[in-house]
Image (cartoon, coloured by chain):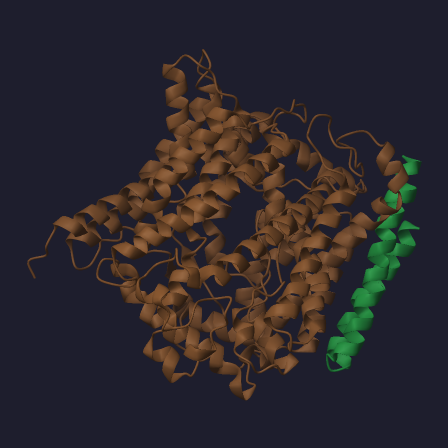
Chain colours: A green, B brown
């Protein structure tokens, strides 16, 4: 799960760079990148609180 | 060896414990006693007229030093009476005296508008006859002609003011407490600046005991340092300004601007060295990772990002060579950093939700968790807590009533959707962001400037009266730190609330009487009050310009807002947070980076110096635990010393202006 979250976040960050370099920096692709990142961050915290703590 | 992941909950928990130098173990007692209440009223009411008078004469008020004067007086009286004073009583005295002295501003707007309605500027801009009935009587009113606040013509402004005040207290109390429970109890954010006030009160309380403690020694060292620094930084310019045409500045106030010097290799970069080295004290207190990452982000912004990327790609396009830091900063702000900063602020809120939602969803287990554990909503026993639903309800009722009143009686034609949007969307979001930034950075992050102007343009409302309405765009986040201070001193919340409820009516009555008598002494403004005689005519013109600037629907701020830059701010901030999580770095770094990006590194140098000295010398010399015990007390003493010098020099300057006649 930790690896999956990391991959999602890295995809979001890379997509943002792509949106700036190759899509003219328009707000729509940036927003999509933000949504991906946000999804990854929420997942990361849910994993930390709900799963990681129980494992500990 | 692979880096071990430290969850954000453990990271915050560790910092919160570091800043809680009592180790989280405290008993709560009421700070409200008869002697404290009477002491606060006596000192506060004694100093309130002087504070108002000083502000009208010289611009300074001495209000920051007044609570410390009261507390020092109190402790000295207690020592000579062989009585002891509890820290809860001293902290209560600090708060109530500050409230009493500060109440002098309650009715200041009445005097201001009493002057405003009869100015030439108000008449020429066609505003004078449009001042609403809830602000001031008509310009030909006898109350204004006779300079009397205790006149029947002021009844509606006074009634509306009192009603708004009651609703405001409800909102501030309810929302401030709710946010405190969320950020301090549930998330266990560290609130690094909160111990300063708490430890100052504790240090002074211990002087009334039998033996001298380390707190008093450290507080004394801090206050002597503050007196010396205050004399150099504030005292010398103030005193020499009285006797000479040009005051002597040992250090230029408030900064030395190097922006034109760096434009050769960093065009559009800003660098102004702050000269208030008193800021080293917060550098001792704040978390080291936050300060350093903030500084690195600011250096990166001004020396690489602005000149090499944003300027090259003409994103920063209004800058011209030769501009100082204010001009450069303003153009950069309008071109890019205003929009980027908005996005940054949203990321704070979203990251905060991501951190707290999982805990809220485990609400049942949150209620079962132990006191003091992150994710626990169990308050410590005896703290005097209130039911969360009561406080939330208090805020909803206060805000709802306020919006209803404004819509029904004040500006019925202004779109209700905007009022509701401000009240129930913008305000909670903004307050939550601020509460979290105070919880981590000890300061506010970002204010949206010209928000009202943008709103009025978007609403297409053209009446003047909207400018005189207090829109429901409030920020309760700052008050969250105060609740943490109350907790750290072991003062019950119920006693603090009771004290405010008892004192507020007394202050509301006494402050109007004081203001009435000061107005009776002489017209305001007049030669009796030289500071406002200088500035109020200019302020009237600025206010008239501000009110009428949107008559043709223009707003510089609205034109500066760009969606792609807002998204850039949001996405970059989220990416920083996410990538730090991926590489298992502390989340403190995120707050430092995002707090510092776009900032001026020169303004941070005193804090960085303090952080470096604290981390690499003080902690090595005294040990981590002792240093974290010392530095809030040191900072409290320091700011007390600076405040006393400030008040002293203002008083000397005032007396000198009354007796010294310059020969030329």
- Estimate the x, y position of residue B446 in percent, counting from the top left: 59, 61
Nearer-the-camera pick, B152 or B313: B152
Nearer-the-camera pick, A1 or B74: B74
In the image, is residue B530 above or below residue B643? below
Q: What residue is rendered at 48% in x and 20% in y?
A: B85
Report whether residue B490 is seen.
yes
- The residue lying furthest to the left in this view is B663
**From the viewer's perspective, is B417 left or right of B473?**
right
- The residue lying furthest to the bottom in this view is B552
Q: Dividing the image into 4 quarters, which one contains the N terminus of chain B?
A: top right
**From the viewer's perspective, is B254 left or right of B349?**
left
Q: What residue is rendered at 45% in x and 63% in y?
A: B271
Q: Dividing the image into 4 quarters, which one contains the C terminus of chain B?
A: bottom left
- The residue lying furthest to the front in this view is B152
- Estimate the x, y position of residue B9 in percent, counting from the top left: 77, 41
**From the viewer's perspective, is B299 left or right of B657?**
right
Tally of marks:
0
- Estimate the x, y position of residue B655 in percent, counting from the top left: 20, 46
Q: What residue is rendered at 59% in x and 51% in y?
A: B166
Q: What residue is rendered at 65% in x and 79% in y?
A: B459
Residue B344, by quadrant, is: bottom right
In the image, is residue B592 above or below residue B209? below
- Estimate the x, y position of residue B307 in percent, counting from the top left: 54, 73
Nearer-the-camera pick, B52 or B163: B163
């Amino acid at each position: 799960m930790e690896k999956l979250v990391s991959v999602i976040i890295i995809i979001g960050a890379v997509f943002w760079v792509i949106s700036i370099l190759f899509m003219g920096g328009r707000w729509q692709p940036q927003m999509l990148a933000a949504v991906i990142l946000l999804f990854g961050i929420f997942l990361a915290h849910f994993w930390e609180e709900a799963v990681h703590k129980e494992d500990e | 060896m692979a880096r071990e992941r430290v969850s954000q909950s453990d990271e915050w928990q560790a910092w919160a414990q570091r800043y809680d130098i009592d180790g989280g173990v405290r008993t709560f007692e009421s700070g409200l006693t008869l002697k404290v209440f009477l002491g606060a009223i006596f000192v506060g009411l004694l100093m309130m007229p002087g504070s108002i008078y000083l502000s009208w004469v010289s611009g300074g008020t001495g209000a920051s030093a007044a609570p410390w004067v009261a507390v020092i007086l109190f402790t000295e009286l207690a020592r000579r009476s062989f009585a002891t004073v509890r820290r809860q009583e001293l902290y209560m005295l600090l708060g109530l005296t500050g409230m009493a002295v500060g109440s002098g501003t309650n009715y200041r707007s009445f005097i201001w508008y009493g002057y405003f309605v009869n100015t030439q500027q108000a008449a020429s801009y066609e505003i004078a006859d449009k001042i609403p009935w809830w602000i001031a009587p008509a310009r030909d009113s006898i109350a204004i002609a006779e300079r009397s606040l205790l006149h029947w013509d002021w009844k509606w402004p006074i009634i509306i003011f009192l009603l708004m005040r009651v609703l405001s207290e409800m909102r501030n109390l309810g929302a401030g407490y709710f946010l405190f429970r969320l950020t301090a109890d549930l998330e266990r954010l560290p609130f690094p600046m909160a111990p300063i006030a708490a430890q100052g009160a504790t240090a002074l309380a211990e002087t009334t005991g039998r033996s001298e403690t380390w707190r008093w020694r450290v507080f004394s060292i801090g206050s002597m340092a503050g007196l010396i620094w205050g004399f150099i930084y504030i005292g010398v310019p103030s005193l020499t300004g009285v006797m000479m045409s040009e005051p002597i500045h040992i250090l230029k106030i408030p900064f030395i601007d190097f922006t034109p010097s760096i434009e050769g290799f960093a065009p559009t970069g800003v660098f102004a060295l702050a000269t208030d080295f008193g800021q080293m004290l917060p550098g001792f207190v704040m978390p080291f990772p936050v300060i350093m990452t903030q500084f690195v982000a600011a250096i990166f912004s001004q020396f690489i990002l602005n000149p090499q990327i944003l300027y090259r790609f003409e994103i920063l396009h209004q800058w011209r060579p030769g501009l100082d830091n204010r001009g450069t900063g303003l153009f950069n702000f309008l071109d890019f950093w205003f929009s980027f900063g908005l996005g940054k602020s949203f990321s704070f809120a979203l990251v905060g939700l991501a951190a707290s939602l999982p805990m809220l969803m485990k609400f049942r287990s949150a209620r079962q968790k132990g006191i003091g554990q992150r994710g626990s909503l169990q308050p410590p026993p005896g703290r005097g807590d209130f039911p969360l639903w009561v406080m939330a309800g208090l805020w909803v009722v206060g805000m709802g009533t306020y919006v209803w009143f404004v819509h029904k009686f004040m500006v019925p034609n202004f779109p209700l959707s905007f009022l509701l949007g401000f009240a129930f969307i913008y305000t909670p979001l903004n307050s939550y962001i601020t509460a979290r930034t105070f919880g981590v950075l000890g300061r506010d992050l970002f204010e949206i400037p010209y928000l009202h102007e943008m709103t009025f343009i978007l609403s297409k409302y053209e009446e003047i009266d909207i400018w005189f309405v207090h829109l429901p765009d409030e920020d309760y986040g700052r008050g969250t730190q105060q609740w943490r201070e109350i907790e750290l001193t072991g003062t019950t919340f119920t006693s603090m609330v009771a004290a405010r409820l008892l004192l507020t009516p007394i202050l509301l009555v006494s402050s109007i009487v004081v203001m009435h008598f000061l107005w009776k002494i002489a017209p305001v403004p007049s030669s009796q009050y030289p500071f406002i005689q200088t500035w109020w005519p200019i302020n009237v013109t600025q206010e008239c310009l501000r009110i009428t600037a949107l008559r043709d629907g223009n707003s510089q701020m609205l034109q500066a807002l760009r969606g792609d830059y807002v998204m850039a701010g949001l996405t970059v901030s989220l990416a920083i947070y996410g990538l730090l999580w991926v590489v298992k770095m502390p989340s403190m770094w995120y707050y430092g980076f995002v707090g510092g990006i776009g900032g001026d590194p020169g303004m941070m140098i005193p804090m960085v110096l303090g952080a470096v000295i604290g981390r690499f010398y003080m902690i090595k010399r005294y040990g981590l635990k002792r240093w974290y015990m010392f530095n809030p007390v040191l900072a409290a003493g320091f700011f007390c010393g600076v405040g006393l010098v400030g008040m002293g020099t203002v008083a000397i300057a005032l007396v000198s202006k009354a007796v010294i006649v310059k020969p030329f």
